[in-house]
Amino acid sequence: MEKIRVVTDSGADIPENLVQELGIRVVPLTIHFGAEERQDGVDLSPEEFYRRLAAGEMSHTSQPSPAQFETAYRELVEEGAEVIISCHLSSTLSGTMQSAQLAARAVDVPVRVVDTRSASRRVGLVAIEAARPARAGEPVSAIVQRLESIIARQRVLFMVDTLEYLQRNGRIGKAQAFVGGLLNIKPILTLEDGVVAPLERARGRARAVARLFERMAQTAAGKLRVAVMHSQADQEAAGLAERIRSRFDVAEVITGLLGPTIGTHVGPGTLGVVYHSV
């Protein structure tokens, strides 16, 4: 039985308890405040990040270097890893995948680099779905095949309080069509092949949250694994998670705060849901 370890990046937004429980290695992206550089989850917490955002500071991100990934992979090999599965932010959104692929060539064990074609909890769910069977002793080929199936059927819906952050950081994608909307209109978005795409506009936050749930109800089927994500929208996230538990057959609902990597691009007030059939 091969000893498989899983690596992801800080854009996966996996809760720390699951990172520890499943032994997932998280390679941080760098958050820049002007000339100052901080490592997401290492020396920059979500709480500090959102305080600085609220104070008007501007941030942007940069991908991990190949050397950072190589260090992570080599440390896992020293811990006994014989195969590594590395699950990352969409290659259309970040150069993180490229760094991981370059590092994979420099180590002496097989590294399967997986493009999740997405971001945030969608990446996180893929990494979790890799780590659990890896710990149970499943072969790497079967795990990677299942991951590709999950990626193909995953869905993500999210609303942002403003398109300012997506636009400013060059991640607005097809949602550019929504720029310049009416006051108090909240965009509802998705990701298509790793690119932000518009779905609809709702008037006011309450209506936008309701439409997230309604759209999920139109497409979700069977037993689900779900992640609810938010940036400083705790009560709305808790309420949405409760509605999901009441309405659907769920294997798991993971709820938590978006970290600095994704928060940089979506800003405060974002709420979203990721789901796939089990």
Image (cartoon, rainbow, N blue to C red):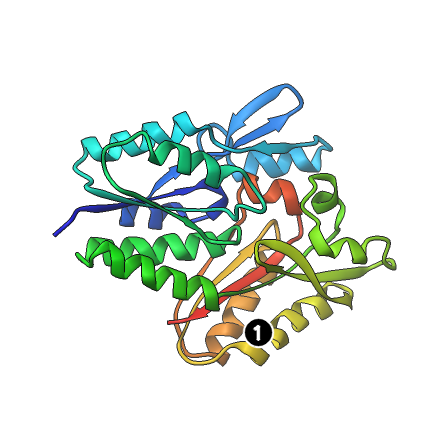
Residue 241 shows up from this direction? yes
Residue at left offset 32%, top offset 57%: 144
Position of residue 155 in the picture relative to residue 249 (left or right): right
Q: Which quadrant would the C terminus be assigned to in this image?
A: bottom left
* Front residue of 155 and 66: 66
Residue at left offset 26%, top offset 30%: 75
* Front residue of 55 and 31: 31
Position in image of residue 94 (x %, y %): 56, 41
Residue at left offset 67%, top offset 23%: 34
Q: Is residue 12 above or below residue 155?
A: above
Number of numbered tags placed on the structure image: 1
Position of residue 130 in the picture relative to residue 259 (left or right): left
Position in image of residue 153 (x %, y %): 47, 69
* Front residue of 57 and 133: 133
Residue 225 sits in quarter: bottom left
Q: Residue furthest left?
A: 1
Position in image of residue 90 (x %, y %): 52, 49
Q: Which residue is mark 1?
A: 216
Position in image of residue 272 (x %, y %): 58, 60
Q: Residue furthest front?
A: 105
Residue 149 sits in quarter: bottom left
Position of residue 110 in the picture relative to residue 18 (left or right): left
Under circle 1, the secondary element is helix
Q: Is residue 27 above or below residue 262?
A: above
Residue 253 shows up from this direction? no
Residue at left offset 56%, top offset 68%: 240
Q: Type of residue at label 1?
A: Met
